[in-house]
Amino acid sequence: MTDVLTPVLSANWADERPWKITNYEHRGGYSALRKALVQAPSQVMDVVKESGLRGRGGAGFPTGMKWSFVPQANPNPKYLVVNADESEPGTCKDMPLMLASPHTLVEGVIISSYAIGCKYAFIYCRGEVLHVIRRLQQAVREAYSSGYLGRNILGSGFDLDVVVHAGAGAYICGEETALLDSLEGRRGQPRLRPPFPAVAGLYACPTVINNVESIASVPAIIEHGARWFSSMGTEKSKGMTIYSLSGHVQRPGQFEAPLGITLRQLLELSGGMREGHQLKFWTPGGSSTPILTADHLDVPLDYEGMAAAGTMLGTKALQCFDETTSVVRTTLRWVEFYKHESCGKCTPCREGNWWLVQLLTAFEQGKAVPGDIEKLLDICDDIGGRSFCALADGAVACVTSAVRHFRSEFEAGMKTPAWELFPYQASALFGARQEVHA
Amino acid sequence: MTLTANTAQVVVSDLITVTIDGIDVQVPKGTLAIRAAEMIGVAIPRFCDHPLLEPMGACRQCLVEVPDMGNGRGMPKPQASCTLECAPGMKIATQVTSPVAEKAQRGMIEFLLINHPLDCPICDKGGECPLQNQAMSSGRGESRYEGVKRTFPKPVSISAQILLDRERCVLCARCTRFSEQISGDPFIALVERGALQQVGFYEDQPYDSYFSGNVVQICPVGALTSAAYRFQSRPFDLVSTPTTCEHCAAGCQLRSDHRHYQVKRRLAGDAPEVNEEWNCDRGRFAFVSGRGEDRLRYPLIREDGVLRPASWPEAIDAAVAGLSRLGDKVGVLTGGRLTLEDSYGYAKFARTVLGTNNIDFRARPHTAEEADFLATRVAGRTLGEGVSYAALEEATQVVLVGLEPEEESPIVFLRLRKATRKNRTHVVTLAPFASNGTVKLGASLVQTAPGEEAAALDNLTADANTVILLGERAGWLPGVLTAAAALADRSGAALAWVPRRAGDRGAVEAGCLPGLLPGGRPVADATARVDLQAAWGVHALPATAGLDADKMLAASGNLGLIVAGVEASDFTSSAAALAALERTPFLISIEQRHSEVTERADVVFPVALMEERAGTFLNWEHRRGRVNTVVKHSTSPMTDLRVLAALADALGRPLGIRTAKSALAEFDELGAWETSAPVATPSITPVAVAEADGLLLATWRELIDGSRSNDGETALQATAKAVFARVSPNTAADLEVETGDPISVQSDSGWLILSVYVTNNMADGVVWVPTNAPGTPLSNLGVTAGDLVLVSKGGAA
């Protein structure tokens, strides 16, 4: 099975204290930076473009193309902002990366900033993960003292300052324009577009916002070349990426593999579902991507494959649920999250999720009435595609896909509480034993 | 919910064509789809959209389909038409032709209603509520929502005047955008998230804004209400009348709503050229001062030293007897409440009936220099010849001299703020310190102690794109108006006089000045007098300039006085003014309410309140604002003009006018005096301030202060700024005081004890005191800006 995995970003995670700069350098860290700094910024940008790297934050927009949208003639400063506000339910790839090897990100930030002409970069990190923030801050400090940051980096004449900014814990701040508002010290709510951040982003200056994993992939691309990177993956989804498996699997965790791997392969790597149980449904990229079932075990986990299956690759957060799990209950938990995290700016997300929670609660309690499934779907129809930002689309995706694949469970919610159909202790992973024996 | 006409001159080549519901419409580039749809008569429902606020796209009520962006491709999702700019060739399908848009809008209304209380029957907004109306037009008949509604404790006071019922709020952010973008008082903001998002405020700093009432008016639901109007009336029981505000010279158009012979509320009218759709809190809420016990209801005459009620004929006889004794030894003092027609009546009455030029509207500090300035630079200049609101927006630089617009002309302030935000107009202000309004305009402060303004103007650079705005206080200190005029002449800058009171501009045109006849005709000009004699059909007009207000008071020992609309505290020294009124051999007071003037009068004539009569105010631009009769009584009330006409008739020298309509017609027929007045400005050397102990006094009136026209509106009065005396840090150190310490401000006539506020970046050796703070009017001291006062630590503040 080892040939399936392609550890690049995660290659040093098992090293001794991989977050220390000396250990990172010992493995060849910061050599990509030296390579980049002797090239013209446009050459660096071209390599990233050629590599076919697509944004790893969920939407999959080509990274190099995003960079090229920055108007170089604009006299204002250009900013690079790294979106490290990883908050999507089920997603746990950026945090382990920054915890284990923060220098991979820092090196990526320096190279990317060089490519787009940025002299001031920000890493906006989710506020709850203090240990990760400390690692990042320490890494940035080390990079300064080693001359990788600051004035005249490695004698190249390139200057760069990096600020690690701690968010205050809001899902919406993962939305890039809300993140910018938050970074500017305002309340995080999405901004009206146009103008797009590439033209008027942070402090109304040209701004590139990239996911942690996208930026962390840049050093390897520079080090090994675009061709090396694009040799991995599928036709339109190039390179390696981190898949995070969680739920009822034997060995949950991060698996770095080329795009296009299937869940069946990943499950084999993780030892399969927990003993005696079968896969019932799963999310390909967090709760905002429509769920799939055991029928989709062999669909390639790349942008195109997931789109063809009616869902999205998203953050590659594969939450796997076995047959003991109530779809109704799971959906309710997810929508409760969206209700709690809706920023409140626009009506459909704010009011719609408030309503969905109440309707789904009725299904969970077995108190739904005939017509409620239609009502549920109709409300989802009035939310999806109607909201200010894309988060509400994600909120209804889990509901509509759950009804699509498991309508009978919703029909049962008109008669029987979910806890009778699917006793909750059976699906519990932690703390269940005490309850059973209590 | 109003559509503003695009007032900009549109070049045809700038027009683009879009197709809405199959109908082609040409719109200027940059037009939002929601407005383009209005042009073909399609009203797309909306909540957060407001034409004067920046687009937000939050409520999502105005979703439309865009099958073609103009490039052959459609947009995959419905778009908010309030944020969608029209592009050439764009095709838009609204709820009229698109089932998708129609369903989206229906869904949005349903969402807005699930958490909205069904309290329309007790909600002030019920009957004029955009949510109610659009629920009827775009909503479903019956609710599908069976869940729990979000509730909040209610209401929350966000200021003494403004109340918030959070559960009614649809979170459109109109109020927060208004306060941030328009008035610049961002003390309210949306806080929390999800369905618990709400309008929040900082408890330590309540929503103190002079413009807070506007948020009530633009709230599309009943979430924001005013203490003044809450539960007062149902909209459908009100009768609305357009009128003009009487509180300052901004000339705001208002909508005055009344019921049961009583004005219940006033709203900002829709006047794009003047107040756009805004007004200030004083103009909105201060309209009940005439309802108190002190309202004059019948004439009074003095008998055996005591005023007693009298019939109208009796009072007129008494007045005529007094006036006949005095001949032309009479003076007329008029005040700021008078309309153009009233002022014209007094001006004509003084000349043709009394035979004197002793008339002056300047019941406040004034100088001969100011009279000359008004005669040569202001009188006779019509709208279009001078500066307008639009010109303020277009100017690259605006210089404020003796003018704190937020306090003294709030709509000028709002327009300047718009200019600074949209066109980066640079505002320069000559003042002793940067006021709150100055900060909100981002204005450059030219720090001037009173008396230094003229020198500062001499050093200022200006060009043809500069506008110099002169407040009434610019005329108080010698040399300032002259220096401003010289700067304008030197640089080609435009000059405008922005008086504080609503009637002032009209009074200048009407000839309520000792050297100026109606239409800017100089008394000294024989041809102007002959012209007027012919028009008025009189043999002669007094040929010598009359006494100004101060001189009339000084000479009152053998001068009868007719006083209308004047309070003793309007003058520098109320004590001196009252003493003068006591000295006068005969005093006629024409007034709405009992006052210190009526108490001393020999004959008192009661006249109608503003809402009971018609007329015209000329605002600072010389724009006419129609004052309409709001409350119509079965008998027409006595007005200033009818009193004057009755007196004139009884004196045997008929005035020829007795209604506002006839007065205006006659005034218009006179026209302005066309012979250009000499522009030569007198050269005046500013008086050197004597080296003496004490601090130089600086002062202005705050918008919500002790003025009697604010009486009765307690919630409004409670929003007044805290009263402070301001000194610079150096001066505070000399006085050994800190912020909050009591200080006494003393003159020969008395003292005030005030709390001190140490103000950074303020001129040293200066103390600033509000002119007319409730309970501590500066007129008690008999001093004004530029005078020296003794300031010392202590007192029982």
Image (cartoon, rainbow, N blue to C red):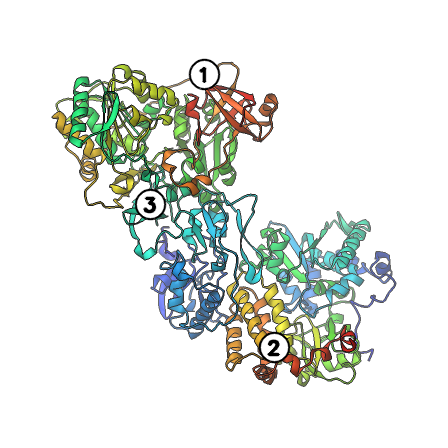
Looking at the rendering, which quadrant does residue A39 occupy?
bottom right
Residue depth check, mark 3 versus mark 2: number of the one nearer the observer: 2
Q: Is residue B741 left or right of residue B642?
A: right
Q: Residues within 10 Å of mark 2 (few under 14, many from 20)?
A: many
Task: Give the structural element (helix, strand or loop) at label 1.
Answer: loop
In the rendered structure, which amino acid carries the disc numbered 3?
Gln
Task: Give the structural element (helix, strand or loop) at label 2.
Answer: helix
Q: Nearer the viewer, residue B602 or B627?
A: B602
Q: Chain of mark 3?
A: B
Q: CA distance from mark 3 to mark 2?
A: 58 Å
Q: CA distance from mark 1 to mark 2?
A: 83 Å
Q: Nearer the viewer, residue A171 or A193?
A: A171
Q: Is residue B681 left or right of residue B207?
A: left
- Which numbered marker is on residue B748? 1
* Residue at x-position 64% and y-position 63%: A171
Residue A420, position as x, y percentages in the image: 65, 82
Task: Give the structural element (helix, strand or loop) at label 3.
Answer: strand
- Which numbered marker is on residue A364? 2
> Mark 3 highlights which residue?
B253
Q: CA distance from mark 1 to mark 3?
A: 43 Å
Q: Residues within 10 Å of mark 1 (few under 14, many from 20)?
A: few
